Image (cartoon, grey):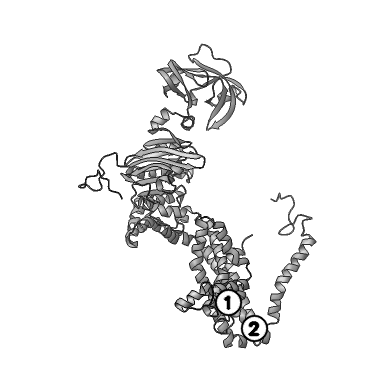
Amino acid sequence: MTIMPEEPAKTPGTPPGSAAEGLDAHLVVDRGTFRLDIELTAAPGDVVALLGPNGAGKTTALRALAGLAPLTSGRLRLDGTDLRRTPPESRPVGVVFQDYLLFPHLTALDNVAFGPRCRGEGKAAARARAAEWLERMALTEHAGAKPRHLSGGQAQRVALARALATHPRLLLLDEPLAALDARTRLDVRAQLRRHLAAFEAVAVLVTHDPLDAMVLADRLVVVEHGRVVQEGTPSDIARHPRTEYIAQLVGLNLYRGRAEGHTVRLDAGPAVSTTEHLRGPAFVAFPPGAVTLHRDRPTGSSARNVWHCAVAGLETHGDQIRAELTGELSLAADLTTVAAAELDLHPGAPVWAAVKAAQTHAYPA
Amino acid sequence: MTTGREPPRTARPRPPGRGVPLALLVPALLGLAFLLVPLLALLLRAPWRSLPEQLTSPAVWEALRLSLLCATMATALSLVVGVPLAWLLARTDFPGRGLVRALVTLPLVLPPVVGGVALLLALGRNGVVGQWLDAWFGITLPFTTAGVVLAETFVAMPFLVISVEGTLRAADPRYEEAATTLGASRFTAFRRVTLPLIAPGIAAGAVLAWARALGEFGATITFAGNFPGRTQTMPLAVYLALQNDPAAAIALSLVLLAVSIAVLAGLRDRWMRTV
């Protein structure tokens, strides 16, 4: 550990200001033609989710933080200590891997005791510590079980206990719920949320599932093509998506354009009437459920946003049908099966789409 | 998939016209016979009546003891240096790795006698390394039991290295990464995680190497000679006995055959089940 020169000698272990505490990273990793370049900061107690499509570089970022992938350049400070030259085994970082990677030849207890053992504790002390962690995870009765005899949810908790048993200052979780089936996922997500909320240091999780990210994290960092495209609280991002990817994730039609009062002239062509009054570059978003479809051009309605489109594709979502439309404007519309049948919707069918200004939402870009 | 339209008459109905072509069946059976008949001959001509007497003779015991001892020591030596070598080949990237790998496998295809000659030139009393061993430590390796162990190691270790390297490549390296994030050095990760995970592969490689060492003839007789009680292992004893006491040679051969069958039985899970 390097001692910070500005750190007062009287209070060792207490970093001077809030700026030095927690994670302060600028990760740059070059991999062939792919370049990851993201800023990531978090205070102790924060749970940050890196959200993005597959191949966006989320896992690379995680590996760089853990020291498993070398940084090309940038900065990496944890609680004021520069970690760039620190080998992974010496970093105060715990990792929960996507498929957990519990050591198959060790019991749950010895898996958890592995970290403390490697960090110099005696066998008995390490096992006692591991037993405490398993108890905290309600896994005491599975302490002697080998990983192959654990359920997905149990294995996940053992992996979490194993990562936490070394008292990391940074906890990394790679797609923590991806390996679980839908039913256990709900339970495990709730448990994981509790454990993360109780964790006093920085937690960074990587996921491509917006629901996981929004439930588990206080703050989302959306990564696409190795760049941060948006950052904010879950509700912020859900309300004001700034890229097509996020808009699709949260189920919104999103367009970029230039606002002129109550209209936003879209880059894609037509204008959209809104209730907000804005000037300059802006986004307009509306949910697919706000779109109404008509066989003939609607007349005399309050909907001023009317576009002539053609059906590009139909998909069933529960008892709803989602229609992908192209034409004057590309958009998604949700309607009931009955309505779809009455409109005689089929790929290629012409249709009029309408959205009320009150249902749209415009915000500065 | 059976449709149920045609109730099968036998347990496994065979589609018509799908028999084995004669052009394949005949050579196949010839090949099988070629492999089995010599073993059968060994059993048929075995001096069963005098066998107990043959096998309890001190000379046989001496050779058998020496063979087992040397093969075991050679296997141990192969494990100590071969497993790390396999790890190096499987887990690290260095210039010329392909060449090193090829050199490691060379003794697999090299005639053992050539290996023996090469060992003499390296470790013989006037050899490249041997002269210093002699001058500095007074160690001479050729024509000693230690020489037998070295000759067998030279021939057998590649089997172990190749087997362990294959197992390592198949093992998920991310377990080592997981261990690293928990504070394990690379060596600790290898010792506490990788080694237990690849133990079955190491065991199989060790058995293979041991069997190869047990049957070693060419390199041993070239480098270590043929001194009863010191360097005369079973294969050497068999060869020598064949000149003046064929019955003893057959008896010794039966012992080696029994050992081989035992090895095969021990490995059946690994190789005989591969379909």
Please provide percent x and percent y for residue B81: 49, 66
Residue at image location 39% in from the left, 37% down from the top: A39
CA distance separating discs 2 and 1: 17 Å
- In which quarter of the view is residue A227 placed? top left
A277 versus A220 height, above or below: above
Q: Position of residue B170 (x, y in %)?
A: 54, 56
Query: Residue B223: which numbered mark, if any?
Result: 1
Q: Position of residue B112 (x, y in %)?
A: 62, 72
Task: Quarter of the image for the C terminus of chain B: give it.
Answer: bottom right
Left-right relation of A82 to A297? left
**First reached walking from the N terminus: tag 2 or tag 1:** 1
Left or right: residue A198 compared with residue A210: left
Q: Which residue is mark 2?
A: B240
In the rendering, at what x and y percent does residue A314 appear?
Answer: 58, 29
Residue drawn at x 52%, y 57% as measured from the top left: B90
Can you see residue A225? yes
Dot 2: within a 10 Å radius of its alpha carbon, few (fewer than 14), some, or many (20 or more) residues? some
